Amino acid sequence: MIRIDSIWLATEPMDMRAGTETALARVVAVFGAAKPHCAYLFANRRANRMKVLVHDGLGIWLAARRLNQGRFFWPGVRHGSEVELDAEQLQALCSAYLGNASVPEEPSRCSNLSAMARLPAQLAHQSIAATSPLWQNRRHDFASESRSIKP
């Protein structure tokens, strides 16, 4: 099981063609580091696709979600800023109901909408991730590791 201690949402859109290395580089550029047991969320410009990068302490996981219809509620705060979410807000964000005008009929899903009601207030405070030296382990140094491009 993948342990996730904190969840960070990037407000700037990302190209969803990005693979693991490009997404990792984007995490380092936006958040300052790829910290263990943290999840980093990115969406495309239309907010109908999302990628989640998780550093589990040993390696990188990259997951993607595409909505067939509707959009994710993706905050449009200042570019280059990021927001920390709790698990309930993440569940609400990943719900396909958020971009639709209709309210879900399932009572279990309605609690997700109340979780997102707290998000705009949090965005007003501009919770910015602390920048720290890039995370290192015995196998990788993400700050100094150079990548060669092969033709």
Image (cartoon, helix red, strand yellow):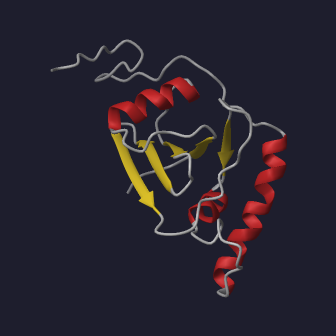
Q: Left or right? Give the position of 107 relative to 121.
A: left
Residue 103 vertical placement versus 52 (above, below): below
Residue 149 versus residue 142: which sits nearer the camera? 149
Residue 3 rendering spot, x and y as whole percentages: 46, 51
Residue 79 rendering spot, x and y as whole percentages: 68, 32
Q: Quadrant of residue 147?
A: top left
> What residue sits 71% from the left and 73% below the top?
101
From where the camera sits, is residue 34 visible?
A: no
Quadrant occupied by the N terminus: bottom left
From where the camera sits, is residue 63 visible?
A: yes
> What residue sits 41% from the left and 21% below the top?
136
Residue 128 rendering spot, x and y as whole percentages: 71, 32
> What residue sits 38% from the left and 31% below the top?
22
Residue 101 vertical placement versus 61 (above, below): below
* Residue sitting at the far left: 151
Residue 118 rendering spot, x and y as whole percentages: 80, 57
